[in-house]
Image (cartoon, rainbow, N blue to C red):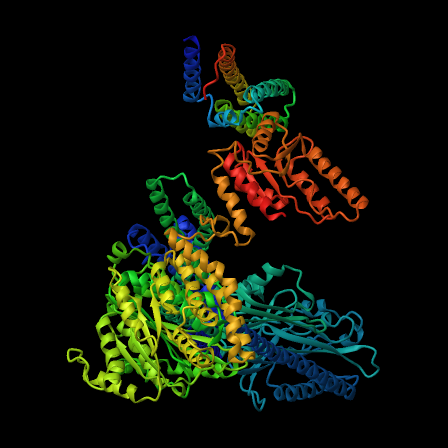
Amino acid sequence: MDLVQLQRQLVDYRTSLYHEGFLDEQFTQLQELQDENNPDFVVEVVSLYFEDSERLLNELSKALEQQIIDFKRIDAHVHQFKGSSSSIGAQRVQRLCIVFRNYCEAQNVEGCLKCLQQVKHEYSIVKTKLESMFQLERQILNAGGSVPV
Amino acid sequence: MAEKSFETTSQACCSTSSESSPILALPMDTPLRKVLSRISGFASSWGKKTVTAPRGRRIFHRDVEQDEFQNGSAHCLSSYYSVFVARLAIMVMLAILIGLLTVLTWHFTRVYTTKSLNTLAYGLRYELLQRPILRMWNVLNSTSEITTAQVKLSEYVIKRYSKPTNQAELIELYQMMKDITWALFASHKALNAITINYRNGFVQAFHRDHRSNNTFYIYSDLANYSISDTQSSQQGWNDQFIHGNESAIWYRQPLDPVTGEKQGKPSQIPPEDLINIAGPSQVPDGVASWHVAVSKYTDSPLLSAALPVRDASNRSIVAIVGVTTALYSVGQLMKELVEVHSGYIYLTSQEGYLLATSTNTPLLNNTANGPKLMMATNSEDRVIRMGAQWLQKTYGNKFPPGHVVHVEKANLGGQHYYIDSFFLNLKRLPMVGVIIIPRKYIMGKVDERALKTLVILISASVCILVIGCVCILILTNGVSKEMKLRAELISHLDARRRAEASSNYKSQFLANMSHELRTPMAAVIGLLDILICDDCLTNEQYAMVTQIRKCSTALLRLLNNILDLSKVESGKLVLEEAEFDLGRELEGLVDMFSVQCINHNVETVLDLSDDIPKVVRGDSARVVQVFANLISNSIKFTTSGHIILRGWCENPIVSSDSGKLSPDQKNPLSALKTKLKQHGNHMKKASKKDNKMILWFEVDDTGCGIDPSKWESVFESFEQADPSTTRTHGGTGLGLCIVRTLVNKMGGEIKVVKKNGQGTLMRLFLLLSTPADGIEQQRRIDFAKHGVAVILALHGSMGRLIMSKWLSKNGVPTLEASEWNELTQILHELFHARTTNSGFDTHYSLAKPLRSKVQTLQDMKNPVYIIVVDLGLLDLSTDIWKEQLNFLDKFSGQVKFAWMLNHDTSNAIKMELRRKGHILMVNKPLYKAKMLHILEAVVKESYVEPPNGSPNGTKGTSKQGDSHECLEIDSSQFETCSSDDSDISEMTGANSASSVGVGEQLKEGTVLKSGPPTLRNCLVEFTRLGLEVNNLRTEEDQCNGRPKLHDTKDVKCENPDSSEQPSVRSNAKDRDNSYTTNKAANEQKTLEGLRILLAEDTPVLQRVATIMLEKMGAVVVAVGDGVQAVEALNCDLDRDENRTNRLQTEICDSPPYDLILMDCQMPMMDGYEATKAIRKSEERTGWHIPIVALTAHAMSSDKEKCLQVGMDAYLTKPIDYKLMVSTILSLTKRSP
């Protein structure tokens, strides 16, 4: 009973993520790619994403603290961030990245800083959401069930 | 003089005015006009600037912008203003010119006159003054001469009577002296007096009073003088003595002025009362002396001279002789001289005392001490006084040397006078002569005339000015109007140019836009095709997608039309010059359209005359486009009837021969011909050289027709004969416009021609050149020789008619049948009648003419009958057709059947026909080339028949099969192009397909030319092999009932039994599978065995992509940046090279990776750089590894950039699974 509830909860949670726009079909594709050969593919990719994103966010904060801001570098970072976000389907982060890049092009420091904060915020939300989702999945797996698709 | 000068002046004025007016009237290009226009232009621009500077641009758009009345009126005002200013400027210039001329003329004439007059006047004055001075000189001279003579005489007399001792002797001496003195005095009338003053005090004198004309002898009393006195007081003789001798008594005795006789008693007078007696005081040094004296009795000054008389020993002075002359005569002379000139002359001594004047005023002052000389400044005469005063005032005492003064304009009492003075330097009596002549006298007339001249000149110039101004007004009125018109014209031209430019921009924009739009449209259509091929579509979805595709093709067609049109309009369309088979192209076209027409119940007929050259030079695609547009247009408006495409060649010789046309069409045609005759003649010259031909075509339909008033306008763009047709038939109205522009471009013309009956007749001619080697004589079997007879059993009456006409022209007798019953009748007549020899069935009653035809056929010796049967004649709806076929089979021994198939004839029927041995099958419509093929096949068969045995055996000879195949393929090949739908947009595709066909056909033709006719079969075989695939596929398409896809990549064949097909087939199959991978991805390893290098820096993406690719069975090597990618490739390359070196036998010609996925933005080295490097390194190996760009930039410029650096494809992030797979497959397919 518990397992079924957990499974339902996971499905609900996932759909809510889709509905609220945190994730898009790209994430579905990721999930489709996961099979017996790569059982933890999604988790692997997402944790890769977390690592990479934290590195990038750190770089960005550092770069924006500099006296002379290298917008090109920031732009490259944001571009990368955007690419990886879109790859896992974190579309809200991705959209913010687009705005960020626009500010970058305009060399607007204030806008960049504001965007950085927003991006960080969104990223943390996505991170917590994804982590809690994985937690659920793990619970299901531990309980001996299978993750519903 | 002045008058003359005025005349010249006025002449000059006239000449200037008469010169200037013709210049003004000259045309625009005279320099003066230019200057005028420039001035006015300047003025107008100035005026514009000041008045309507901001509106200057619109100045001549009045008529265009009539609503802007305000603007217009302002413009009016400004233009008037500018014209006014221009006129004013011209007038002012004219005025200045004329005024200057006048003043100059006046001035010069006046100066000249004055100068000459002045010289003359100076001469006159000099002369006038010279005369009195000469007279004066004469007077002086004569006085001195007389004096000298008197002295000499006196000396002589005194010497004679020297030393008078007594009184008597003395008296005698005095008497003698008196006589000689009288003689002298009488001989000189001008003398006033002669006095002799003796030493002893005795005085003898003669005096003449000029006023009373009396002459007196004056003497002193002798009694008081002693002789001794004279001797003793020789030294003390002085004036005092004389004057002191007051005791002496003076007597005056009047004398007869002529004879000198005494006339009365001497009267006693006071001494020295009357005259001056020259005394010793006047000759103090004993030489002659002069002085001016005055006398109480004369009112003029006297000139007196004195000389001493010496004794014989010349030691002492005995007496003193004095002579006085009145200056009266000088004055008289002067008066006479200047009276005419109303001037004044006076002489003064150096001191200024008046000696003589030309007036009668007294010269002497009567003072208490007797009369005295008067100063000139005190003269009673006003003018003289003033003149003297003026001279004194001007010069004072400092006279110029010689006292020579010439003053031309001295103002004396309000009047101007000339004043000249001369100086006469006489010893002891220097004199100054002054002449005063009123200026009025000499220059008065001149001044007056000058004034008059000036007045006349001014009035004349004013008149000229006024006339000139009027002339200018009149002239500039015209000029300004003209200028206005010109400016308007210029502005119109400008506007037109701008409009043209904008229209040019528009068409360029259209061209660009439609080009740009076409690209995505092509993509849309391609993607739709992919989608249609997809299995997973429901029926509804399929229908929708098909609809979308139709709409897309319609849109693409429209875009193509616009592009064509704008291309032509912008002059970018260049026609090709290539040889092509015109007949073939048109046949293909008709084949294509006939499919469409069959659905419309419209018959398409191609009627080309035999003289049309087989091969012409030109742009085949464009020619076909012309006819395609025309035919499709006709089809659109024709619901029933026929569409005929006629073609014939205009030769100069047969141009009048329009026999192939029905007689009712003859008249309009000839009219058109005469109309185009000049054009044709003009062309003929060129055509002789270039071997050009005028090819005439007609597209004749039985549609709704076009209203004659719209015959011209239908060829305009976006113009349709009936606007309502858009709703019913669709279309944009561009087709005919394109046709006309293309036809014109090809040196032809198109127009709508009047037609009898319903429908439209479009006639056009094209100017196409034929190959230089001359018109190839068409190979033709003389069918008449073979005794061929044809029975045409066809539905379409028009096509049948034309075909039978052509056949009978070529000597092939024909019979026609339009339905099944007719055909059976004919067959009965022909065969049963012959066998039974009598009317077989009475109810099979043929019409008279037909029967006669049948008769003629029956008369033929051993004829070969060919029955061309339209499959439509059979009743296909039920199974009756099989029976009908069986019926016909009965005649198969005697006749040959050729079947006309519809494009949608089912395979079952075909199979059945083939089974029955009917191997001649041709797709509709029937035209000459097909007929020829049929005939040839039959004739050949009939020749081949005897040695081979039974021609209709079930086996069927391969040759026959081939030939029939050939025929069928021939037509089906075109069907391939047209089977889908007959959109014009597909024409390009059709063209390419048909041109392939042409190519093959040409190949065939060339071999045919070289080889004997028997070679044909193997050639047919040769073509068959290549075309079989095509044929098969077409059939499959038809079976499937789905539109055929043009893109070979997307060809989808479900037919499993096509294993013998080339390798393309297997590829296609693979791809078929790939479309279903997303459903069953695990089972399907589409990319099995592919080695893929993935260059991606983002770890997430790298991972995702790797998994994606690996899932499909690809071997993925992932690298983090461009440098690594290049390195990975290079080391593999090197390894390959090494391997190649080691194992010489093993040829490793495949690159290490089948494909590279390259992210564009990477650290160290981005994708573009990496690609460049890879491409560079590839140069030595000759490989080409496909590189697919991965980028998040979704801009097309990025795509271009990617392709530019050498990438092969382009994917956007996030990676779309399907798109990636298809891209990879399409790329790897190429590489072995």
Q: Nearer the viewer, residue B136 or B1175?
A: B1175
How many marks overall?
Answer: 0
At x 54%, y 21%, the residue is A42
- Eyeballing the image, is B861 above or below A61? below
At x 65%, y 89%, the residue is B183
Q: Is residue B634 left or right of residue B569?
A: left
Q: Residue furthest left?
A: B843
Q: Is residue B359 visible?
A: no
x, y percent for residue B867: 32, 76
Q: Is residue B1007 left or right of residue B745?
A: right
Q: Is residue B881 visible?
A: yes
Q: Quadrant of residue B206?
A: bottom right
- Eyeballing the image, is B1011 above or below B1173? below
Q: Residue furthest bottom?
A: B259
Q: Nearer the viewer, residue A113 or B1023?
A: B1023
x, y percent for residue B181: 66, 86
x, y percent for residue B349: 64, 68
Q: Is residue B415 left or right of residue A109?
A: left
Q: Nearer the viewer, residue B421 or B181?
A: B421
Q: Quadrant of residue B28?
A: bottom left
Q: Quadrant of residue B1170?
A: top right
Q: Is residue B1010 left or right of residue B15?
A: right
At x 24%, y 67%, the residue is B707
